């Protein structure tokens, strides 16, 4: 009986894939599920609302824990992963995939608060200028796009090959701060505070530079790229993108009290030319009520 049921489920899956116009293969490792919960919900909504125009789809998520380097390689190949959520400016993704020119985070990836060890707050409270900020060290993933932003601005950076290693390095004092996007830090703090009891969200600084998070689609799936772009534009036009964004982030942005923080401005000369920085309606405006 078990064999019959398994065969039926396999046949059903294959039939669904055949009937679907688009097969969507996002990377949904444990790390990505924590970091990109909002982006996955947005992707699902985009695919759902474009079904009348583009037809059904089937998701075949890739769930293995893999390094950033390998995830980029697999995404460019397009066989196991054909949808990548990433910060912009990775040459291999910009050239090897189809970037969707829509900042799904409204550029908030460039608004950074830091995860720290609790005992570091007093030292960081003394920082008022970029030169003073340069006396601190920050931790980042080895292949993350913002590493070169910190390096360009002469901020000391220490890197790790894996995301999990950064929490260990932080709690062992290998660097002072682990800057995270303001849409990332609260969720990551909630997810990891039990594992790392000394973890805290830094309360004094807001690090700011031009940056964004976007969807990248395999070049073997241009129709899927068009579909996702169309869905995002529809959601922006009818207000549902803002509604989803605010449901996820308005409260935590208010709780982070960005308006009271000391701002450290960094320059980012590495934004790709396709990033739609001129479309002001797509970007976070601290002066505009969310």
Image (cartoon, rainbow, N blue to C red):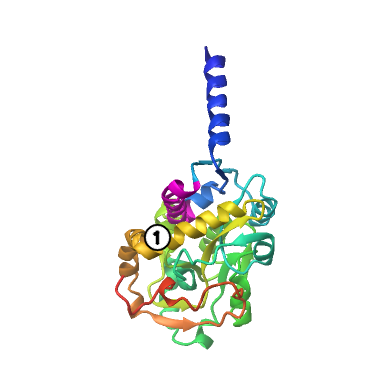
Above or below for 277 versus 197: below
Say few, some or many: other residues with alpha carbon within 10 Å of mark 1 (under 14 / 14 to 19 / 20 or more): some
Q: Residue at x 50, y 70 (%)?
A: 177
Q: Is residue 278 left or right of residue 158?
A: left
Outermost residue toward the top?
Answer: 1
* Image location of residue 145, percent across then percent down: 61, 68
Above or below for 267 versus 240: below
Residue 36 in view in this figure: yes
> What's the magenta region?
34-54
Query: Is 232 within the magenta?
Result: no
The residue wearing badge 1 is: 235
Give the quadrant of the C terminus: bottom left
* Image location of residue 276, percent across then percent down: 52, 73
Q: Name the foreground residue: 276 vs 255.
A: 276
Q: Residue at x 62, y 51 (%)?
A: 221
Secondary element at tag 1: helix
Q: Is residue 85 left or right of residue 195?
A: right
* Image location of residue 285, percent across then percent down: 38, 77
């Amino acid at each position: 009986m078990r064999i019959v049921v398994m065969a039926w489920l396999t046949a059903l899956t294959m039939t669904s894939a055949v009937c679907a116009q688009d097969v969507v293969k996002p990377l949904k490792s444990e790390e990505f599920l924590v970091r990109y919960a909002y982006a996955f919900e947005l992707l699902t909504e985009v695919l759902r609302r474009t079904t009348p125009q583009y037809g059904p789809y089937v998701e075949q998520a890739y769930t293995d824990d893999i390094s950033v380097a390998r995830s980029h390689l697999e995404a460019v190949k397009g066989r196991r992963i054909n949808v990548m959520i990433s910060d912009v400016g990775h040459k291999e993704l910009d050239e090897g995939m189809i970037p969707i020119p829509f900042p799904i985070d409204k550029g908030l990836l460039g608004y950074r608060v830091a995860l720290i060890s609790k005992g570091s707050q007093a030292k960081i409270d003394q920082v008022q200028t970029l030169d003073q900020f340069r006396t601190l060290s920050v931790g980042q993933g080895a292949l993350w796009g913002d590493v070169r932003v910190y390096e360009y601005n002469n901020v000391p950076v220490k890197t790790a090959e894996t995301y999990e290693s950064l929490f260990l390095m932080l709690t062992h004092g290998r660097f002072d701060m682990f800057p995270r996007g303001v849409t990332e830090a609260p969720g990551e703090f909630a997810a990891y505070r039990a594992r790392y009891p000394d973890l805290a969200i830094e309360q004094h600084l807001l690090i700011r530079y031009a940056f964004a998070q976007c969807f990248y689609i395999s070049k073997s799936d241009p129709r899927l790229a068009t579909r996702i772009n169309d869905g995002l534009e529809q959601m922006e036009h009818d207000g549902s993108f803002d509604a989803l964004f605010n449901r996820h982030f308005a409260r935590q942005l208010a709780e982070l009290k960005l308006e009271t923080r000391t701002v450290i401005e960094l320059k980012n000369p590495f934004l790709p030319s396709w990033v739609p920085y001129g479309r002001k309606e797509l970007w976070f405006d601290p002066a505009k009520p969310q």
